[in-house]
Image (cartoon, rainbow, N blue to C red):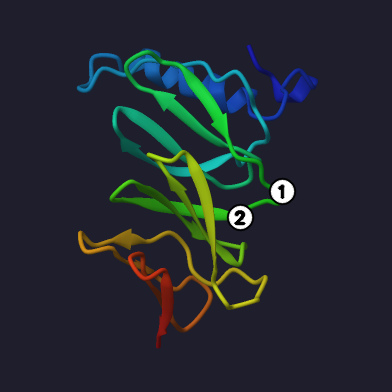
Amino acid sequence: RCNPKDGACKVGRCMLEKYRAFVEQNKELTPNFSFIPISEIQNRFQYVGGQIANGKLYAIINSSEKMLTCDLRSGETDFLGSYAKNDFKWTGGCLYQDMIVMFPRFENTLLIYHIESKTFEEIDCGLHDTAEQNYGGVCTQGGISYQPPRSTNHILKWDLNEKERKKIE
């Protein structure tokens, strides 16, 4: 067991122990939860949000260096990409066509993972501001996504088809 007071807790292990206990206590809920061990813990703020496509979970990179994927049928996990060790890069995201879209938090780019080609693409926000502006977001069926304001006076509107963004004030 994990006990942070005696120093036995490595970053993230307590969180996983708590999650494991939650899953064990709530197995009777529908859908039936199961614990899938992750082979690599990068830091304690690894992912914020996720999307499911083609039977796989794609975890939104927050402070991790790689995107976690998990095949929900087999339980196999994988890590994709390679990004800086910065905290709070992207927070939340959406699925549009074959793209997992990750919304910027402190990064100056919208990060897109193309499922079919298994490639990443970064789109410059053009804001060049390291302060947290917008947080999370949603996407329409037509590929327009919106990020609500967090510490600013504007909504960010992304056209994922044209790969353009606009401030709505």
Q: Secondary structure at mark 2?
A: loop
The residue lying at 57 percent from left, 30 percent from top is 79
As rendered, which of 21 and 125 lies closer to the eye? Answer: 125
As rendered, which of 16 and 48 lies closer to the eye? Answer: 48
Q: Is residue 106 left or right of residue 143?
A: right
What is the total number of numbered labels drawn onto the structure image? 2
The residue lying at 57 percent from left, 47 percent from top is 62
Residue 79 against residue 94 in the figure, above or below? above
Provide residue 3's location: percent of width, then percent of height: 69, 19
Extreme bottom residue here? Answer: 169
The residue lying at 54 percent from left, 72 percent from top is 125
Looking at the rendered structure, the kind of residue marked 1 is: Ala
Q: Is residue 150 left or right of residue 5?
A: left
Can you tell which mark lies on residue 5?
A: none
Among the two numbered marks 2 and 1 on one chain, the one whose residue lies closer to the N terminus: 1
As rendered, which of 161 and 44 lies closer to the eye? Answer: 161
Assign the C terminus to one quadrant of the image: bottom left
Rounded to the nearest whole Å, what is the CA distance between mark 2 and mark 1? Answer: 9 Å
Label 1 CA crowd tier, 10 Å (few <14, some 14–19, many 20+) = few
**Which label sits in the foreground, 2 or 1?**
1
Assign the N terminus to one quadrant of the image: top right
Looking at the rendered structure, the kind of residue marked 2 is: Lys
Evaluate if marks 2 and 1 touch, with contact meaning CB atoms under 8 Å apart: yes
Residue 140 against residue 76 in the figure, above or below? below
User: Which residue position is annotated with label 1?
Assistant: 84
Provide residue 166's location: percent of width, then percent of height: 42, 81
As rendered, which of 168 and 114 lies closer to the eye? Answer: 114
User: Which residue position is annotated with label 2?
Assistant: 89
Q: Secondary structure at mark 1?
A: loop
Provide residue 61's location: percent of width, then percent of height: 55, 45
Quarter residue 137 falls in: bottom left
